[in-house]
Image (cartoon, helix red, strand yellow):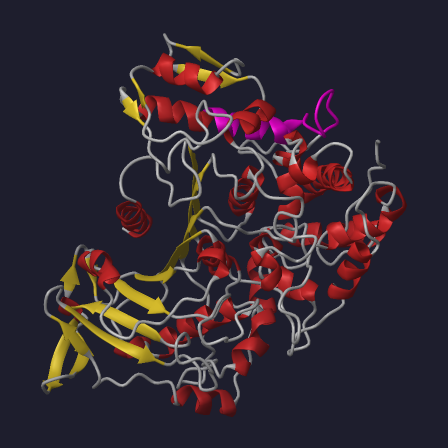
Amino acid sequence: MKLKKILPVMGSLLAEGVLLAAYRKSKLATNPTDTPERVAKTTKQMVTEADVANAQQLLLDPNNWHYNAQNKVYYQVGIKYGTKTSSRIYESMGIFIPEKYMTVTQHDQKTYSLAVNPQAALAGYTARTAPIVMRVKTPRYAAQAAPTDYDGQSAKYTDAGFVYVAAGCRGLDSADHANGAAPWGITDLKAAVRTLRLNQASLAGDTDRIFTFGHSGGGAQSALMGATGDSQAYIKYLKAIGAPLATMAKTPTSDAIAGAMVWCPITSLDTANEAYEWNMGQYSSVGTRKPGTWTKALSTDMAASYAQYINRLGLKDSQGQPLELKRSATGIDMAGTYAAYLKQEVEQSLNIFLQETRFPYETSSDQNPKIGAPNGPVTHQTYQTVQEYIDALNGNDEWIRYDAQKNRATITSLAAFVKHCKPAVKAVGAFDGLTRQQTENQLFATSGCQANHFDATIGHLLKQHQATYSQFAHYQASYASAYRADLQKTDAQGSSIQTRLNMYNPMYYLTSYYAGHNTSKVAKYWRIRTGINQPDTALPVETNLALALKQNSQVKSVDFATVWGQGHIRAERQGNHETNFIEWINRSLK
């Protein structure tokens, strides 16, 4: 049964006319000459006497530093970043500073009084130029507990001359049942950044050189920190926790950062469900995608709607060529420059792997989870030659063609790669479950509701095609009504589900397709790594993020790579992820 293709509702745009009007309007704002002016205007913050009085309560105690002799680091924990915070477990932070950057003015048996030594140098930085790194360890958008003592994870960074910040933040599955729904996790991290700037005179490290880093849900939130700097949408949430919005000099603080390290981000939730069906779901015929089911019909419509989204997103390749999708002889809208771009991305990932890998090559449990194994994962398999490896990938279906003389490979299609290496493992509604069963549904909880729907496109499709879907077994009209009801809910601050979704979507701030473009200060430096085999999210999610960043005039550099044979991990082509992160910061700043 072929269902009618419709225009999806993307973001807060509820009709085609509204979408086109907003699209045209936002295109006018992309002139590079007016971007700085628009950003300055939309992020401008007024300071009140009450803001200054509130911030005064969050000044750092210079006499409460502790010392770790093994790693030669001064540190403080339990630093509050809000006067109205509610969680003792999550809403504070620790700061860890290399010994060389500080001068002891007084100390007793337990604590030290410190002053910054601006002439001190370490690993090519001074106390005033050292970068500040902030971890975001929030897989599945989980809460991150604040440190209560010295944090051994800081040592590698302080040895490199960095200041290390471990800021707790609320999230899902909080041990103390704190409200960790969107946008509280990012709000807490922003409050921590503002507290660093409030206290910059008494701290080592350059607060204009703050870098966040995270994986999975943490990668998503690191990306958000990079994309949403000083967004006015967060101000009422920052005020709700008493974050410092002013300095003692009565100037605004800022939560903008310099750079973001992002591994395998679960992000762009407004279209992540549709991306999953277009990239992966359309090739599956099991579970909720079994032919003859209403969810298979929904999957088909979601895939088609994603193609229409891509064609309005305005992405371009490095040559300025628009990236678009077109109808194809096989598959759903698998022709066009965008599909070709993704195919090239897969081939590049494979060829870099072949160039950098020495054979014999042994896989591990986090590499090549589907290599030559359509019925399950293969681990610790050794391949003596490149050809043996290629043969294992091909199995009985030659989809990789290898030129041994050039040591280069091509693939027959993006579809073949997905079928062999990146099959769909999540049900239709990969992030917004039809029964609100996905982790991300909890991210949009409201008072009295622990999980809510948030995908307006699914809601629109269910309404538009209810008569068609109802012809299949197991369809219930309550699906459409549940989406409709949830999408009308607001949180305690009066924000709609759509507003909160926008706040948790980096793309909303990066590209002129969205109304949020040029309403935030975007980080200059980005490094994105993803395991290309991961089935957790679609390849377009990270690819679109990288493309949008490259087109954003506020961004100075984007280091993006897909890592062949790796899944949902801190994927790296070579070396250790922490070492690579540190070296990237050094290259960006030195």
Above/below status of 511 relative to 355 = below
Q: Nearer the viewer, residue 58 or 25?
A: 58
The residue stretch that appears in magenta: 326-347
Query: Residue 322 vs residue 418: left or right?
Result: right
Q: Is residue 380 magenta?
A: no
Point out the image quarter for the N terminus: top right
Q: Give the image location of residue 565, x and y in percent.
A: 41, 31
Residue 151's quadrant in the figure? bottom left
> Any magenta on residue 339?
yes
Residue 197 in the image, given as x and y percentages of width and height:
37, 74
Q: Decide: is 234 above or below 460.
A: below
Number of marks drawn: 0
Say whether residue 264 is visible.
yes
The residue lying toward the viewer, choosing from 454 and 231, is: 454
Query: Which residue occupies 48% across, 24% down?
Result: 347
Which picture quadrant has residue 356? top left
At x 38%, y 26%, the residue is 352
Residue 379 lies, in percent from the top left, at 36, 31
